[in-house]
Image (tube, rainbow, N blue to C red):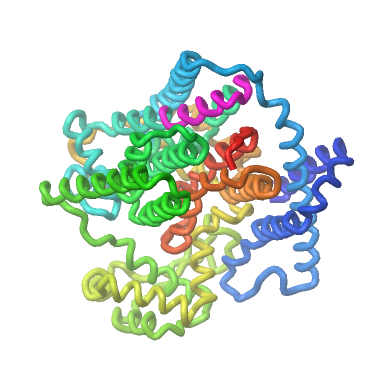
Amino acid sequence: MEVFILYIILFSGFILLLNKDAILNYRRQILWILLLGMYGSFSVLGYNFFLPKDAIFMVSPLGILVFVIMTILMSAFIISIFILIDLLKSRLIQGKEKIDSIHIKIFFCQSFIMFAIIWTVFLILVFPGIFNVDSFFLLHSIVYKKFNNYFSAFFLWILNIFYKIIPNPFFPILSQVLFAAWVFSLWTTEFYRKKISRKIIWITSGLFALYPPVAIFIVNLFRDVPYSLVIVWLVYFIYQIVFNDRYDRRLIFIFGLVTPLVHFFRQNGIIVVVGIIIFILFYRPTKRKILYFFLGLIISYTAYQTIWTLTKTGPDRSKNLPSLVVTAISNSYIYRSGLHSPAARDWVEKSGNTVQWISTSNESCPVNPFHNVPLFLLNSTNERWNSVVYHEMSKKDIMLTYFSLWRYDFKLNLRTRLNLIANFWSINIPDSAIGLYLVSTLDKTNNYETPNINIHFRRPDFIMKIHHFLQTKSILYFIGGGFYTFLLLIIILYILCYQNKQKLWLLVPWFCNFLSLFAASTAVQYRYIWIGLPMLIIMVGMVFIHNKKN
């Protein structure tokens, strides 16, 4: 973290020294800049939320001083980003001449080929793809026809189609790569259409495609990949509706068809669907176009339910739902705070109070959720506990207990929720995505029987060396999801202060995804918050597009 702060100081100092006079241009926004600087300070220092003891870093005079200094540093960093944007705005836009449709189509094809080649080559190098423990559960479910919504019944159905043709996970991942290449080519082509410098688009696209957390994520076999890609696609639809007056009924109908996919891939995607419906109603396109959107929505949901009714392998109750309560109950033991919620206490008593202490190393206080984290876990092997959680407790009981925790144990539940999305807001937690997502392939781990699935792992030595360098010695180690979020908030503030605020409509799916994670996340995983990285790139591009519509 000290090295990361040093990079921030050097960058801010360099920009501010070269543009001393420009600093005064932002004095009217200084209050908002300071508030965002305070958030940045908290995102660096707020990892103390993980401490079992009820102590926050600001309780001492020294802690307050550190917070103030960090706030000033982060505010200087925000101003330096503003200055950099203003310097680049006039230099990134190419000539005013109109780009004809043929050149636009050629550029799209070139962009698609570039993305597809880079990610396909990477997929071949890690053949047949990158897997985590949940990926093997997916393969196991396909072989034994155990379709349920724990890992998305819809995603399992798609994988099952590939399995019937060729029983190798390489091919569904390859189709995933091609879909990703197509989605991101839509955006690069749009930026080209808006006359952003062709060279800048190629350089940015190439670096994005080669960036390890991106390449690694794209070749992962799990539902979060198509879920995130669909969100990027939905953002493109929103962009067309907001900034393209000539969008037709076909586009908004397809928008309605595609929107439910985020719900099909992840249960918490329903919040994204609701957010998009609110956007459609508030933005108010013509009534006829609204009807086309809802027609597509209804057709999509009807088709989904029909498929599972006919196959008789419909989604069952998710095992994730009880985790909404289990995590808070576990944390009540970690923080020695006790439970005040009558419903939660009754739940623990019914299960026989089967709480066990499990430590990954020792009882030292953790500094982040990935290293030396002492955990209190409820014993899932206890028959009485399983009976209470998965059979006796209805969905209604679970949700009532969840809201009861917010009422009676607000501080405990807030801390629990913040802990479980720590890599979304905390700059002090690097992604370590390189390690998290290469480990299963590189270590050749497969503890689940998957007959008739042809998996032959390859582990090139040079990939191991690159992996080790990126995870331990490069600047990428210090860059995490929390830093992407902070940069995105800086871009949002810049748009609010100086640009067309309609651009912020594009953030509706991203914001709804954040709400769903805050409300229901059950683990700290990079794949849950990966969408923040492409959204950051998209919003940076939007800053340089001069849309006239208000």
The residue stretch that appears in magenta: 182-200
Q: Is residue 447 visible?
A: no
Q: Nearer the viewer, residue 173 or 89?
A: 89
Q: Nearer the viewer, residue 46 or 265?
A: 265
Residue under the image location 50 percent in, 53 percent down:
511
- Name the residue at the front extreme: 287
Residue under the image location 61 percent in, 25 percent down:
196
486 in the magenta segment: no
Residue under the image location 86 percent in, 35 percent down:
18
- State the image quarter where residue 350 is shown: bottom left
Q: Position of residue 94 (x, y in %)?
A: 66, 21
185 in the magenta segment: yes
Q: Nearer the viewer, residue 290 or 58?
A: 290
Q: Position of residue 499 (x, y in %)?
A: 66, 43
Does residue 123 sit above or below 341 in this rendering?
above
Q: Is residue 347 visible?
A: yes
Does residue 394 sit above or below 228 in this rendering?
below
**Overall secondary structure of the magenta section:** helix
Number of numbered tags placed on the structure image: 0
Q: Position of residue 457 (x, y in %)?
A: 35, 32
Does residue 50 sit above or below 469 in this rendering?
below
Residue under the image location 41 percent in, 75 percent down:
403
In-image side of 349 versus 481 (left or right):
left
> In which quadrant will I find the C terminus?
top right
Q: Position of residue 97 (x, y in %)?
A: 62, 17
